[in-house]
Image: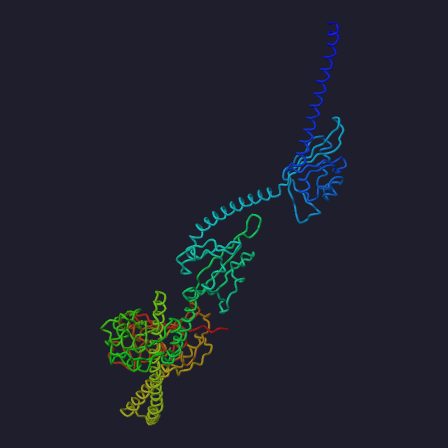
Amino acid sequence: MPGSQRNRPRIGKEEKQDRITEEALRQCLRIEEQAALLSAIFRYSPEGMAFGDTDLVVRAANQSLARQIRVPLDRIAGRSADELTPGWTEQMGDIVHKVRATGQSFQAQAFPFVFKNQPQRGTTYWDFSLSPVYRDGNVLIGYLMLTREVTERVQAERDRHRLVQEQAARAEAEARIRQLERLIEAVPDAVIIVDQNQNVVAINRAVMEMGKVADRSHLLRPLTDYQPSFRFFYPDGRPVPPEEWSALRALHGETVMMREIRVCLPDGEERLVQINAAPVRDERGEVVLAVAVVRDVTQQRRGEWQRRVLSQVGEALSQGLNLEAILQTTLDQTLQLLGADLVGVFLADAERRELVLTAHRNIRPETEGLLRRLPFDAPVLSARAFAAGEVQMMEDVSQIPADLPMTRRLVAIEGARFLVALPLRAGGRPIGTITYGAHTPRRFTEGDLDIARRVANMFAVAIENARLFEEARRHVVELAEERTRREDLLRTVSHDLRAPLTIILGQSQFLLRVGEKAGLRGVEQHSAEAVHTSARKMNAMIQDLVDSVRLEAGLLKLAKTSIDLRRFVSDLLDRARTMMEVGRVKVEMPPDLPPVAADPDRIERILMNLLTNALKYSSSETEVTVRAERANGEVTVSVTDRGIGIAPEDLPNIFQRFYRVKGERKPEGLGLGLYITRMLVEAHSGRVWVESELGKGSSFYFTLPIQLI
């Protein structure tokens, strides 16, 4: 028993030691297991792992890191980070300093890193952590780095982001284009929008109408694909290369203004367009679109050309007076103006009731023979236009009415596919027709019809002018003949009649002197006085007749000089004492009356005519007053009597040739005195008129120009 008691403590102590040993063994096993686990993790981890000392020399690394940096694993340990990846310290130095200073791990995602020894890799991206490693809790012995390359992920994210941005931009662009489409649809001109890829992305309906395209999508394609359906030419006919197209120039930042281009459409029709193109820039100033505004100026330019040709035709027709020559020179222009191939001008012969083919272009001889003379009621389009006084047009010659068989025959001869006949009218009366034809079908627009009417009116005016010119020419010939007759009469009167009259005057005056010397006072003396007086009156009438003929023929020439009317009238009355009762004449003229510019002989004739009449048609107990005054830049002279006056019905004709006052019992002379007075006053650029009242007398007025100093 005692022995057994002594052995109990020993057994307890051994068991405790065994337990300690077993625990230590278990801990060692755990450490070995953990070490093996850590080794396995270090070795097989997909993340790159590396341990470097404080000098950044790698002491351990796994295979994943070797693959990531593309360096064999057995060449990593013992080399610095900069040796393995040149530039590592430059790119990571700040991070290492931060970890060392703070004692805290640093983590980064998608960190950019450039392998300077592997430039082909470009910029790579990494998720990594850099942690400090301590011994005994406070002694820094190095750094543990865990890395994973995420370059592909970053690129994928960037691609996704770019795709999202592109989709958003595309959606925004499409929305902007839809908005632009709504805006440009209201624009009357054709609008084309082109993107940076030279694709037509938007057009308005005006583009479709101009290009004669029904499907909008047919035009929403690359602009350069428009050829060869659409062809573009400069106005001089040279093709426009694509690099010179206005929209493409705008994509390069250029603004194109008022550029004219000829466009040949798919159906062969040619249009003249005016293009304005400009770039559209984003907020960064980069060109994103080009906008081209296209205006069809075909009709505008054609209208301008038509107006020029019309002006030329009108000028030629208005200036010329030989109608046939004018028509021959202007018909070609009218054909071009109206796009016709043949034309005929018919003038009416009213006496024969026929239309006469006066001028034509491109008509066959057979047709000319048929159309040379047409009755007013001929079964042909030209005659119908003349009779109706309205335009007659056939755009479809297959529908010629049965009552126009001659037109059907003419169409067959000429091969015409279109006809239009327009009446020619002058002064409200028909004078002919003008007919155009074309060898191809065509539609006459209102504009074409307006041009045709204007040409017809011009021809009508020219024809009327030619007729008036011919009448004027005949009138001139007649006037020349009349002038010749007047000159012959003037020579006859002034020579053939005056020659014997001069003898009569001379002999009668001789007889009067002889009788006076012989003391004759009887019948013989009175007979001689009667012969002499009658001869003198006849001589005065012959002078009046000669003067009237000269005045009417424009043969009378004035010898103007400066005349003081006060002195002139006084001298005239002194000379006329033996011929009239000058004692009855009273002169009233202001002393400051300016001189007049006149022919003295003609002024004397005017005053003598007026004074003679005033004294003759007034009582011997009354005065005749001669007045003159300055008024309105001229001198007005008047001769006033207090005689019997002139009836109102005679006043309008008192200055007419050969006019005699009604009721005059013993008319003397030829009725030329006042007529010659008027002609002489008007020859001085003056005016003459009369104021009279029966039973109270008359006042005759005339004006003369003031002599300019």
Q: Is residue 290 left or right of residue 474?
A: right
Depth order, front residue of 451/496? 451
Extreme residue in the top direction? 1
Percent across and percent down for residue 410 are: 29, 77
Dividing the picture into quarters, in which one does residue 411 lie? bottom left
Percent across and percent down for residue 197 are: 53, 55
Percent across and percent down for residue 326 are: 38, 78
Dividing the picture into quarters, in which one does residue 600 lie? bottom left
Dividing the picture into quarters, in which one does residue 303 lie? bottom left
Q: Is residue 642 left or right of residue 283?
A: left
Q: Is residue 420 left or right of residue 253?
A: left
Residue 73, above or below 552: above
Depth order, front residue of 584/228? 228
Location of the N terminus by quadrant is: top right
Residue 138, above or below 518: above
Percent across and percent down for residue 229 are: 45, 63
User: Does residue 220 appear in the picture of this structure?
Assistant: yes
Depth order, front residue of 604/516? 604
Depth order, front residue of 176/123? 123
Count of number-bearing discs: 0
User: Does residue 89 appear in the picture of this structure?
Assistant: no
